[in-house]
Image (cartoon, grey):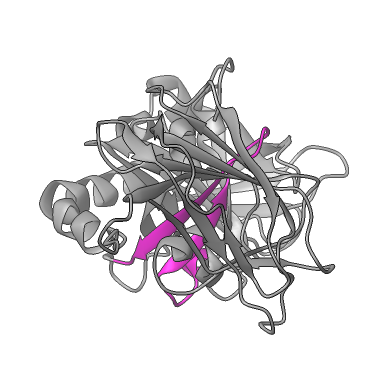
Amino acid sequence: MFFGAVITVQAQTVAIEGSTGEQGFGWMFHQGGVCYAILPEHVAGPLPQITLTSGAPVAVGTGSVIRPFWPEIDLALAVVRGGITARCIADLDDLSPTTASRAAGRLRLHRLSETGEDEWINLEVVDRAYLTIDAEVTSEGDQVYQGTSGAFAFVGDVPVGMATDSERPQHVLLMRSEEIHLNVGRFLSEQSLAFVEQTEPDTSVAAGEIPLAIASVNAAPVSPSLGPDNMLGEGSYVFDPLPSIEILLRVDGEDAVELSRFALRSTPGSGYAVPRRLLISTDQGVDGTRLQTWFRGEMSPDGQFDTGPRAPRNIRWIRVQILSAWDDGPIEISAVSAQ
């Protein structure tokens, strides 16, 4: 969860991994109770799932991509889910230019490092066309390297364009923010509800189980197809090890429920490591800020972890901390369940 920091329009920059390993950036905004990300179509890749990571402290989310625009425009939209949505505060209208931003000759391109730190590149506008802005790098030693697509350029805190191409390391082509605002706004006003409903994850649970949702994770999946939502449906969540892996689950609904048993499953022989030492904490509060230890234990090497029946506790939140694994390398979880 994310507390105590001022989230600016620039902080809506997110790093994106596309469906087949593409690397780039995007920009989040919030509308109608939904978090969206704007990104170049070529960064999204050919499949519907992407992974998003925020600036530091890093939060992770997943995105369901739609490509509703004509083929010649390198633009896509994604519905964003997961813990990263707590950072999603910008408005689509923030893409509307001001008189000063429309006339500005100097811009700053915003990227994120691998650890989520801000990277700024100074640019000078060399040409403003109807749909695009051509700019040259003026920061000594900086380059527009591969993987910059999707980064937005700003005048102050006003986004003026999104990087889509580069002819050489000192050059960047930006799609103008006005063009993005026009096309995304028209799509959202006409078809967004159907798209959001279509991409809702399946939250069906077996009889007697508590319906859960993924609130946040602190480890990005190794591939968008191996994201955290898989733990509540079909497939696996696979991630690189960290000193402490945290998965925060929330009860899907308004009211606290009684928890008496929790289970987690991994798949030995999948080629990934099985978790070992686990710490389970719970909270019945509305905001999940007072988590208390409920169970400590180990998953067996065959990939089974079950607390067994315990004294019931009222909860709205469950935090799973994975403190170690049976082997080195990426860790796999195939299912979580609560009763």
Residue 103 makes an appearance in the image: no
Is 50 left, or right, of 196 in this rendering?
A: right
Q: Which residues are magenta?
A: 40-67
Q: Is residue 175 visible?
A: yes
Residue 270 x/y as whole percent: 66, 82
* Residue 316 sits above or below residue 320 on the image: above
Q: Front-most of 278 and 37?
A: 278
In which quadrant is the N terminus drawn?
top right
- Asked whether 3 or 263 is in front, the reply is 263
Q: Position of residue 226 (x, y in %)?
A: 55, 69
**Which of the 4 image quadrants contains residue 145?**
bottom right
Residue at the (20%, 48%) spot, across then down? 188
**Is 59 contained in the magenta span?**
yes
Residue 207 lies, in percent from the top left, at: 25, 61
Q: Please state which of residues 126 and 264 is positioned toward the viewer in this rendering.
A: 264
Q: Is residue 270 left or right of residue 306?
A: right
Residue at image coords 37%, 63%: 65
